[in-house]
Amino acid sequence: MDCIGWDVGGAHLKAARASGGRITGVVQQPCPLWLGRERLGEAIAAVRARLGEAPRHAVTMTGELADIFATRAEGVAWIAAAMQSALAPAAVRIYGAGAGWLAPDAVAAHVEAVASANWHAAAALAARSMADALFADMGSTTTDLVPLRAGTVAARGHTDAERLAAGELVYTGLTRSFVMALAPAAPLDGAWTPLAREYFASAADVHRVLGELDESADQMPTADGREKTVAAACARLARMVGRDAASAPLATWQSLAGFFAEAQLRQIADAAMLVLSAAALPPQAPLIGAGIGRSILARLAQRLGRPFISFADLPGLESTAGDWLAHCAPAVAMALLA
């Protein structure tokens, strides 16, 4: 029986269709929940137009953190109810990690298990193929670092608060992170220049200037609403140091972008070392990379001295979805685990 897995984020809605145990389609749709709850319904309709109908649906979420909700509990309950309403009369189940599969009207009693559990779903699927590994998923906004031991999810944290403290959740991503959150100052013309504490540029600009960005994965507007070009990205980065792009050659802004990319990687590497210090993984246990930031995670694996395996290359995950199989790992996990 076909199943569609859904990962309801605060910025994107991701979905994957499984048929006969094989992923046959994957979609990511912009869904900025902070701009209004109606955005979820619009995104669901856009996804269904591409993936079609299915008799079963499995849902995980992180969108409950959007500040349109007064509390996480409110967000969990509203998203579960909205998914049930939009997908009726098909069967809908909500992923609750250790609490199992839940009916939408039962999530209020399991908020901590349901809230932001998408990392657990993707890691659990990866653990079926790789008994010992560090599962890492770098998305647009955050990076998950989850140890796998003996074929099980061996995370120390379960809630967002616990995972932040354990280093298993790092609030930095490939596209949406603010540049001002990557470092307090940057080297420019032989001096450390403090950064403007303003949303003038995003991590997407950093990776765009370096030629490392898959533009299809960057679905949100730029900080200034202007073009997604290298020239426009340089202008945004220049504002971070109080300059105009014309004040220096392209090489200067490429060097600045390189510093920010390194600062971001260090944040993730520091967290990974904290996680590994407690996980006691075998030295050759690989890093399994998922998300749109897999190229960054491949560098992380090299820095940690571990083999790198893309989530899309795990045994049993063959699909025609290509890179999107790994881009949307939690949605894929929902479709297959259900």
Image (tube, grey):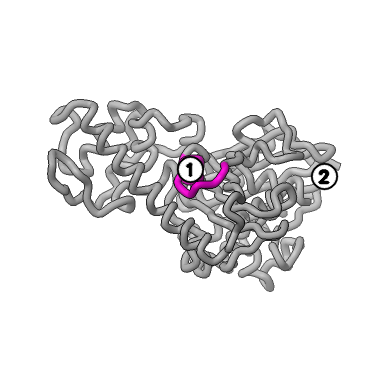
Q: Which of marks 1 and 2 is in front?
A: 1
Given the image, on which type of amino acid does mark 2 rest?
Pro
Q: Range of the magenta residues?
A: 296-307
Q: Nearer the viewer, residue 160 or 47?
A: 160
Q: Position of residue 264 (x, y in %)?
A: 37, 48
Report the residue marked by disc 2: 55
Q: Which residue is drawn at 53% across and 54% down?
A: 144
Q: What element carries label 2?
A: loop
The quarter of the picture where residue 51 lies is top right
In reply to whether residue 217 is colored magenta, the answer given is no
Report the residue marked by disc 1: 302
Magenta stretch mostly in which secondary structure?
helix
The quarter of the picture where residue 106 lies is bottom right
Given the image, on which type of amino acid does mark 1 rest?
Gln
Observer able to see residue 193: yes
Q: Which residue is drawn at 47% across and 62% down?
A: 274
Q: Where is residue 3 in the image (x, y as percent from the top left)?
A: 78, 44
Residue furthest right as drawn: 1
Q: Where is residue 163 in the image (x, y as percent from the top left)?
A: 52, 65
Residue furthest bottom as drawn: 109
Quarter of the figure with the N terminus: top right
Q: Position of residue 287 (x, y in %)?
A: 57, 47
